[in-house]
Image (spheres, helix red, strand yellow):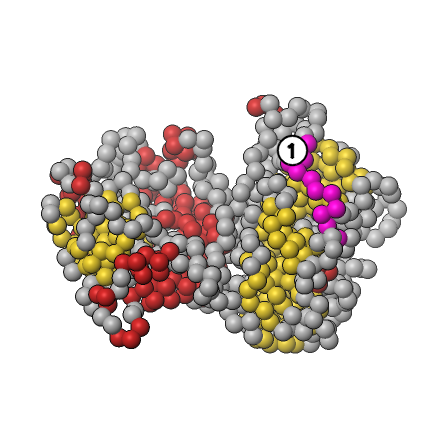
Amino acid sequence: MKPLESGDPIRLGPYRILAVLGEGGMGKVYVGQDGEGHAAAVKVLHPHLAHDEKLTQRFVREAQMARAVTGGAVADVLDARMEGGRPWIATEFLTGPTLDDAVRSHGPLDEPTVRALAAALAHALRDIHTAGLVHRDLKPANIVLTATGPRVIDFGIARPEHGLTLTATGQVPVTPGYGAPEQVLGRRVGPPADVFSLGAVLVYAASGQHAYEGSHVAAVQYEVVHGTPRLDRVPPMLQPLVGPCLAKDPASRPLPDQIIQSFAPPRGAERAWRQGPIARDITTREHSLHRLTTVPGGVAPQSVSRRRLLIGLAVGGPVLAAGGGTAAWWSRKADRAGRGPFDIPAAVQTPKARVLDAKKGDYVLGETPEPLWSVPSALGDDSPAPLPVRDVVVVGAPKGGIAARSVVDGRLRWSAPEAVATHRYLSLSDELVAAVDRSGTLVTFVASTGEPKWTSPAGASSLLAADDEAVYLITKDRRVRSIGRADAKIRWTVEVDADLGTKAASRGIAAHGRLVITTADGDIVAIDTGDGRKVWERREQAEGGRAKLALSGRSLCVTGKRLSTLDIIGGKELWAAKNPKPPSGAPVFWGLPTIHGRHVYASVLQFPLRFDLRDGKATDWAYEGLLECDPPSPLVVQGNGLWSVSVNKTRGGINVIDLSPDSSRSTWVFPIIENPDHYWLEGDANRVFLLNGTSLSALPVF
């Protein structure tokens, strides 16, 4: 956001122009306010383009197209005029993040929210197509998530359904990877092109990855026309629904009504726009807009000074719907003097490390590269597993408390001596880190900076899990408690008929309205996150310890005495793997499950196996005899490799197996485990973090 410059208009029609929101290829977008105090986003064509009759017609057509759509699917056009030979369009404010920024800030949406998004956008496309239009540029940056649901913006290249293409082949004015194949090839474009774009949008929303990728624009467009979309990180239950939208043949793509029916979001899925991190973004922007357009003491709106508005925008303005490359704007900055404990800054972007490539000389085949960084004595003796949260990794500090280190170089970013690491720590939507202090108070810190935020006198002994609504913990008197993230208040406290253990013995996963707890004595209990009532349970899943969990969509993988997958909502078993027969007749124990794409990995009898997540069928991939791993070792997939630890009584090492489809099963070996009794692996953003006694390292991936 920038102040007005020489040449910027002071007034356009009824709107007093107060600041520059952004600038795109066709025009500038300003914040304006009319005489009644109503704000609008005012988009103006660049002066040097005003003489181009075709561009001027296209600019004016944007307003005409948006006005033709009814049903609340798009941002309302408030006014459109010609001013000094330059056309301008005023649209309503849409307060909320774009889908693009919501995914970058909070990560991929869960399955119910993706279903709600798909249904809402299909409704929007139906309204657009009913008006006889084709949007032609549906993408995450052109979708604003508001409290009433997703809204589609930017009709800059929309056309009537019978209209011809705007440009020749190779000059398609759409975001690469989201325009349909027929659009890339310069052919006639109809409503099915918007359905293709919707499919690409849903892949991004569900996985955080683009459906089509390449090293340059031409490569991406080639993949759109000839390649296969990347659905491996889309939840398995959504893949058969998204796939048809991305059919190469327009006639094979479903209609919007069919999409609405097939995605059928569960009851309450639309709460994502009213509760959780996205809703908090929306609320923050609504409050900011109110502050910007309301003057204390009843002073007329026109008297709001430009300086006050610029300052207000700089401390957290709302999203403004507009086109021309400035579909949404807001600032991440905040006024520290006035920011409260529930004003949470958006999560920062995750800095990804480079994937090493032997063909480019990054390492020599047969040799193991050096760690990216390593910090001796970075952790306490009893530190839990490292917790990567965007640009930091959280660990137990060597002198007590918790500490966050940069994922890039391992430098200390912040510490919280009052927190107790052994009570565990959690990530809250990648925005906050939650922990428990010595008095049992639940404390939270901004993940990137360590700034203290809200607290709750929760009487906590250890943390279990968190979702968008609450933090779940075990109290000092061994009960389970829910603390609301919106107000830090106790929502409910229940007794659970299970051994919750001591010293953070129990673990949990919270999703889809269920809190699943693995108890100290090997049981699994699922309770309703709304009221704490028990919904289902599975007894004696593990002997002599906790069962282990991993979740993808509604599929909950559970290991212990066997490997099985359950529906997290009802607890129904979907499939179970057949236990191998150990030579010694000893009990079988399955290690920690890891889900990657459509596969689940788990070790048994010291060898990792891979199963199809959808039906439990064992794949033809197995490394028995080639790769051994410690039974309690985590299995981590990063880059193209599967990482595990193999130890003996004195030391051990890390084994990395290439999972690439064309792999010749090359390996890396890091013989660096100095403490075989205290190690762990976690992976994120092309790094593998190794807890090795009291040292912390980041290892590269290939």
Left or right of 600, for residue 221: left
Above-or-below relation of 409 to 285: above
| Amino acid type for the residue under numbered disc 1 | Asp
Q: Residues within 10 Å of mark 1 (few under 14, many from 20)?
A: some
Q: Which residue is mark 1?
A: 658
- Which span of residues is magenta-colored? 370-380
Left or right of 250, for residue 481: right
Residue 544 visible in image:
yes
Residue located at (18% from left, 38% from top): 49
Residue located at (41% from left, 33% from top): 220
The percent coordinates of residue 673 (x first, y second) are 78, 40
The percent coordinates of residue 685 (x first, y second) are 57, 43
Residue 600 visible in image:
no
Res 304 quadrant in image: bottom left
Above-or-below relation of 260 to 702: below
Res 163 quadrant in image: top left
Residue located at (15% from left, 41% from top): 50
Left or right of 28, for residue 220: right
373 part of magenta stretch = yes
Above-or-below relation of 396 to 303: above
Instruction: From the viewer's side, name the closer residue of 93 and 572.
Output: 93
Helix, strand or loop at label 1? It is strand
Above-or-below relation of 463 to 622: below
Left or right of 595, for residue 101: left
The percent coordinates of residue 551 (x first, y second) are 61, 55
Identify the image quadrant of the C terminus.
top right
Residue located at (67% from left, 62% from top): 419
445 part of magenta stretch = no
Instruction: From the viewer's side, name the closer residue of 396 and 617.
Output: 396
Instruction: From the viewer's side, name the closer residue of 466 and 83.
Output: 83
